[in-house]
Image (cartoon, helix red, strand yellow):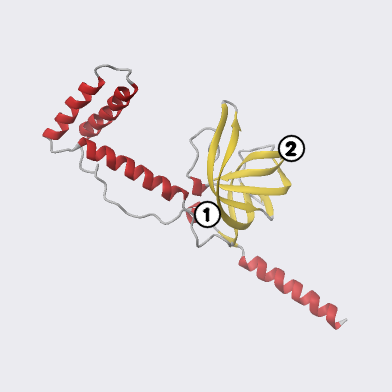
């Protein structure tokens, strides 16, 4: 009897500890560390930015050989910027470097929440159904994300497995998910009305529970 009571006491204590260890987070907690960098475009005027965008477009047309005048037109615009002391080719290279840097940061997880049991809100986008229950889905921060708007950054999406399933009568109603958050970068195909798109995802979870936001 004492052994049974001790076992029950330990089980109860473990459940309390487990509940206490669940950390409620929001989407800003999922963002990885962001590094600062000098913005080489900061001093450009609107007109100079427009000229740079035109050069980029003309370079594309010249490369595709769809506009015979594109190369010469781009060269003329480069001279215009050079007269203002602006190196168009340097800025276009910086554009690629910054884009790559920002893309890498958008995929980087926040290691301080990885491996923790967390609770967070969001909207679900079904990937796999069992009847009218979503057993696998993407959790996103805003209603209609990936459907009516471009996908959020990869580290702002969680790939969720939930074998118990969650009813999907109203996909525009937020939910709470709970479980251990893991970092596992992957790409998932999402089917929409106008076709299929691939969505990059940084986080994954085998959810312990999925409940309506107001619960």
**Observer-nearest residue: 101 or 51?**
101
211 w.r.t. 143: above or below: below
Tell me where residue 77 appears, x and y as whole percent: 19, 27
Q: Which residue is mark 1?
A: 26
Q: Is residue 142 visible?
A: no
Spatial CA distance of label 1 from label 2 is 28 Å
Q: Residue at x 67, y 52 (%)?
A: 215
Tell me where residue 16 appears, x and y as whole percent: 69, 70
Q: Residue at x 66, y 67 (%)?
A: 18
Q: Is residue 201 visible?
A: yes
Q: In the structure shown, which secondary structural element does the residue marked by tag 2 occupy?
A: loop
The answer to whether marks 1 and 2 mark residues whose Cβ atoms lie closer than 8 Å is: no
**Observer-nearest residue: 140 or 89?**
89
Q: Residue at x 25, y 30 (%)?
A: 50
Tell me where residue 194 appears, x and y as whole percent: 57, 25
Q: Residues within 10 Å of mark 2 (few under 14, many from 20)?
A: few
How many numbered circles are shown? 2
Q: In the structure shown, which secondary structural element does the residue marked by tag 1 occupy?
A: loop
Is 95 positioned to the left or the right of 205 in the image?
left
Viewport quadrant of the N terminus: bottom right
Tell me where residue 46 appears, x and y as whole percent: 23, 34
Q: In the drawing, what numbered circle is on residue 143?
A: none
First of labels 1, 2 by sequence position: 1
Q: Residue at x 33, y 18 (%)?
A: 66
Extreme-left residue of the structure:
83
55 w.r.t. 164: above or below: above
Is 40 positioned to the left or the right of 188 in the image?
left
Q: Residues within 10 Å of mark 1 (few under 14, many from 20)?
A: some
Extreme-right residue of the structure:
1
Q: In the drawing, what numbered circle is on residue 132?
A: 2
């Amino acid at each position: 009897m004492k052994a049974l009571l001790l076992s029950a006491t330990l089980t109860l204590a473990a459940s309390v500890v487990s509940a206490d260890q669940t950390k409620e987070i929001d989407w800003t907690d999922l963002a990885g560390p962001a590094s600062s960098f000098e913005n080489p475009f900061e001093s450009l005027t609107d007109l100079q930015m427009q000229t740079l965008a035109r050069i980029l477009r003309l370079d594309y047309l010249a490369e595709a050989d769809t506009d015979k005048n594109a190369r010469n037109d781009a060269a003329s615009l480069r001279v215009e910027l050079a007269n203002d002391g602006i190196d168009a080719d340097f800025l276009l290279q910086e554009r690629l470097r910054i884009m790559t840097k920002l893309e890498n940061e958008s995929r980087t997880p926040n290691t301080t929440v990885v491996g923790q049991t967390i609770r967070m809100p969001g909207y679900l986008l079904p990937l796999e159904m069992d009847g009218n229950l979503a057993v696998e889905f993407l959790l996103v921060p805003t209603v209609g994300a990936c459907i009516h708007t471009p996908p959020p950054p990869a580290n702002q999406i969680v790939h969720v497995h939930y074998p118990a399933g969650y009813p999907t009568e109203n996909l525009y109603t937020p939910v709470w998910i709970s479980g251990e958050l893991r970092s596992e970068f992957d790409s998932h195909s999402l089917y929409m009305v106008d076709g299929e798109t691939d969505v990059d995802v940084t986080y994954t979870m085998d959810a312990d529970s999925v409940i309506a936001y107001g619960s």
